[in-house]
Image (cartoon, rainbow, N blue to C red):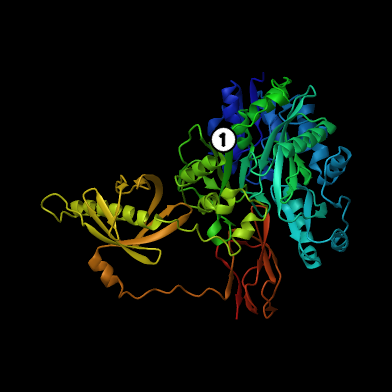
Amino acid sequence: MFKKILIANRGEIACRVIRTARAMGIKTVAVYSDADARAKHVEMADEAVHLGPPPASESYLLADKIIAACKATGAEAVHPGYGFLSERTSFAEALEAAGIAFIGPPVGAIAAMGDKIESKKLAMQAGVNVVPGFVGEIESTDHAVEIANGIGYPVMMKASAGGGGKGMRLAFSEKDVRENFESVKREGLSSFGDDRVFIEKFIESPRHIEIQVLGDKHGNILYLGERECSVQRRHQKVVEEAPSPFVTPAMRKAMGEQAVALARAVGYHSAGTVELIVSGADATGQGFYFLEMNTRLQVEHPVTEYVTGLDLVEQMIRVAYGEKLAFTQDDVKLTGWAVENRVYAEDPYRGFLPSTGRLVRYRPPAASDNVRIDDGVTEGAEISMFYDPMIAKLITYGETREQAIDAQIDALDRFEIDGIGHNVDFLSALMQHPRFREGRLTTGFIAEEYPEGFQGAATGEGLTARLSAIAGVIATVEAARANLIDGQLNGPAVPPTDWVVKLDGAEHRVTIEGDAVEVDGKAVVLDAPYAPGQRLVEAIVDGDTLAVRVQRRRGGWRFTTRGASHDLTVLPPRIADLSHHMIEKVPPDLSKFLLCPMPGLITAIHVKEGDKVEAGQPLAVVEAMKMENILRAEKAGTVAKVAAAAGDSLAVDAVILEFE
């Protein structure tokens, strides 16, 4: 077995590989950029080698520096993780030339499957179902329009070398093609160094199912069941689970056998994934189509590990060393259910805009046999504009799907993240959504269920009373402490017993006498240990466990639980009565400004002073984290002033345009 391997990646996947290597008794080498000098993966590894400045093109994507690091440290093999160099044939070839093992598939398979145009041709030859489309070179926007018109709308435009949701645009009309084709080309070139685009028919209301394959160098190739990855936003997976609530045993067998046939056709070994688009109305096992093959480990691999009991990273390492798979297809059994949520640095309350900055507070939920946290950050770390905005992956397991989902909700309530925007509330809302829990999923789930954006999960029955009771207990403890500090009492501090809790636009009377708590005259059985300054309250309310994140805010508190934040004020009854006479402060009107929604680079301004614009018209393009975001007019108006220009780097809420 290898004695030392280098991980040519960063963040949570680097940490993930290091954990398995350590368990196998293998030494590890990390690589890092200036931005990652104090990163978690650097601390975890046995050795670390500096690569260069923060941009990936000047550090993590420099194959020659990776190889030099291997030679300097004596690393015998490289695990590429996902992204970066994981699917670059030139990197695998350079490693081979240097006598360093690549913990991944053969070069030929990477080349064949890395080009989405060529991979579709190979899939057809291997007898795999494929989506109708155009798989040749597209010469221009006019050519793209001609092709799209011929296929029939809607169509999907994709960067040939793309992945991770980058370089993809959906077009419902010729106008959409003309507006977005060049943007797809630019994203492909920026992210993958390849501006070729292909166009295929968009299957409406589809599911996104993927088959995990695993092969060795001795001709053995297996499929390890499927993952349901339909819950997506902007073609980026948000929730994954294994198995799928939709796939039947017959469908699983048909999908798995086609995936193995494709892998065999390209001489595949190592772990890989065949992604399929599935007609949501067809459960016969025939309504699925080849989408692409990812010749690497997937972000969502932990759910497969939970239900199969296999460590995929360990299997990749053993295959790279030349070992045969120690099990057969008949040995692969799917047990229980696993769900994965991706915790991102993005703000769902502001249209999921990327959020960068320092993790002022980062406390993930406690890991257990049924709760797994894969992360690559620590408290105080910086979420950089240079890399993917993922903070962590939360994976939960249960004997049933319902148990795995409920474990997600409980664990998400215990995530403490301050300093940046994050999507924890949104993920919790998804887990509670009736349609999700019923398993009625398509790739349009988020767009269909949150057409006006996300404003927090609906407050469940009885939750208001429970939060009011907890607020009363917290206020009582804080009042007792304040009395002692102020020295206002000669004897023991006697906290108030009556409170008025203003929550979600309503007032609730809370009375506390010893251990007895009443909310609006109704008894609540509450055990909520709290000490001043505590940030997470784990209460038992009427026999149910409820974790609430608590933040002190000016004039009150913010409680966050079950996918929503609630601003509260807790006042003695007399002060609550007087507060009704306070004048409400109205926020300033910013509707005449186009503000930069995130820190980013202005790549285009489409209007000039004096231009009249219509609702929905593109105004500017902002690039952040390698994704282009088109800013559109919310209503008709006239441009009074252009305050930014292409090439400007702007902070969040910086003014781009001003309207009359």
| 387 vs 469, nearest the viewer | 469
Residue type at numbered disc 1: His
Tell me which residue sits at (76%, 38%) in the image.
255
Q: Secondary structure at mark 1?
A: helix
Graded by Cα atoms within 10 Å as few (under 14), some (14 to 19) or many (20 or more), the crowding at tag 1 reads many
Side of 496 relative to 9 (left or right):
left
Residue 590, percent across and down? 53, 73
Side of 342 relative to 283 (left or right):
left
Residue 342, percent across and down? 58, 45
Q: Which residue is mark 1?
A: 41
Q: Quadrant of the N terminus?
A: top right
Residue 7, percent across and down? 64, 32
In the image, farthest residue toward the left: 490
Tell me which residue sits at (56%, 66%) in the image.
654
Examine the rendering and report whether any part of residue 377 can be seen: no
**Vertical relation: 385 (above or below) 364:** below
Side of 528 relative to 108 (left or right):
left
